[in-house]
Amino acid sequence: MTEEQFRYLPDTAEDEKEMLAVIGVESMEDLFTDIPEEIRLKEELAIPAAVSESELLKQMKDLAEKNVSAGQMPIFMGAGTYDHYIPSVVDAVISRSEFYTAYTPYQAEASQGELQAIFEFQSMISELTGMEATNSSLYDGFASLSEAVGLAAAVTKRREIVLSQAVHPNARAVVHAAAKGRGLDVIEVLMEKDVTNFNVTRCLTTPDTAAIVVQYPNFFGSVEDLAVVKKIAEDKGALLIVMANPLALGILEAPGNLGADIVVGDTQPFGLPMSFGGPHCGYFSVNQKHIRKVPGRIVGETLDADGARAFVLTLQSREQHIRREKATSYMSSNQALNALASAVCMAALGKQGVQEMAQLNVDKAAYLAQALQDKGFAILNQSPFFNEFVIDLPFPAEEANRALLEAGIIGGYSLAETYKKPNQLLVCATEKRTKEEIDRFIAVLEGMNHA
């Protein structure tokens, strides 16, 4: 392209007149004659007056400086989006134009790099989950869970889903919304302290139950006993769906080894910044018998005409553009760039690095919890937890968060709205939290307790 083709020229009055003449109308108003007069906007839009570029840049800069990032304050909030270490190589790789601008790799001969990246992502997630196959990603972990419920209903031909209330509340909301369209009944299981109530689960699971859904670790950070849930599901012929934190799987037993039929989750802990809650990257893992019902795409390894290693889109049988009304899902786009970021992060950390990072999360959360208990605070969790737990405060959680913010600390997640527990605060300590930051957090709460 020439320099002339890149120039930006606004339309002049003469340009508008010429275009209107080509269309065959006399004025801009003539273009809106089909819109009834009574619904047309008569007044100017209620927006600020135009300003110069330099004035606008200054306004935006002033607004931006009001923001506070996790890089400026230690953050103790998790609840589904976490402040984890991201190796520098992640941004270096995903910023390359061949990855950054890539779309769905339908043409294998032109997309070998993208396809290999997705293949490696699938392989590493499958190893963590203990399952035989993983798709090439979905929008986020909540979308993955919703699709897992759909798969379970399709496979079992049953209409009921037993869903633990220890599953992330936003994930449960997505499941309920999608289930309505699929004609499924979602039955929620109450909790027993910090984990799913298995006695209630057993009572609610019937011959019409398609699947039991649990989170691992659950929303409160506690580790659910998957073997017990699997036995309950097996007794009624239902599937076990597990929504798992992939980082936690670096030290926890793989759900696939404990009998999970479908494992889903979000790879945000691996290489994805918090970014106000998204975009994320959902994964979806199954065993061979369910592979043709998986949403999204699966990349496979093969040999090309010359016998060299090559990668292709092996399975996309659920696609609506191929199967139309017979598609098993309408979940189309994959989060290829975010999947690549997670793959690069996992590769950079390595198997030992992932295990060490996971162990640091356990250790730092345990230090925080023990120190709080030593100061007289009650910890709700009675089961082993990963990097999150719930503090039962003697004052409202929102007051604690305000005091923490004033002290330069981003606090936890109040359970007031979602679980009607105004004095309970869900807090998280990742590998990035230092002893000094943790001690400052404790000191603020202790000061409030003695005020």
Image: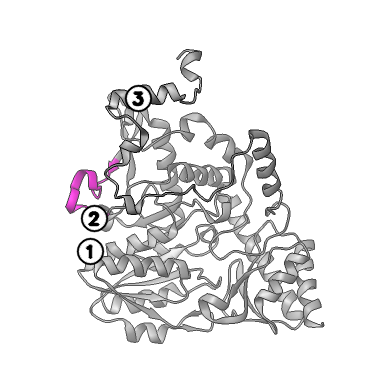
What residue did someone put label 2 on?
Answer: 328
Q: Which residue is mark 3?
A: 19
Give the x, y percent position of residue 401. 69, 70
Q: Is residue 202 above or below residue 39?
A: below
* Residue highlighted by disc 1: 154
* Side of 68 where 247 appears, left or right: left
Q: Position of residue 300 (x, y in %)?
A: 33, 41
- Residue numbers of the magenta segment: 314-329
Dot 2 amino acid type = Thr
3 vs 1, front mark: 3
Is residue 355 found inside the magenta-colored segment of the image? no
Distance, label 2 to label 3, CA atoms, is 47 Å
Give yes or no for contact between labels 1 and 2 (Cβ–Cβ under 8 Å). yes
Please name the residue shown 58% across and 67% down the image: 386
Q: Is residue 331 above or below residue 9?
A: below
Q: Is residue 324 magenta?
A: yes
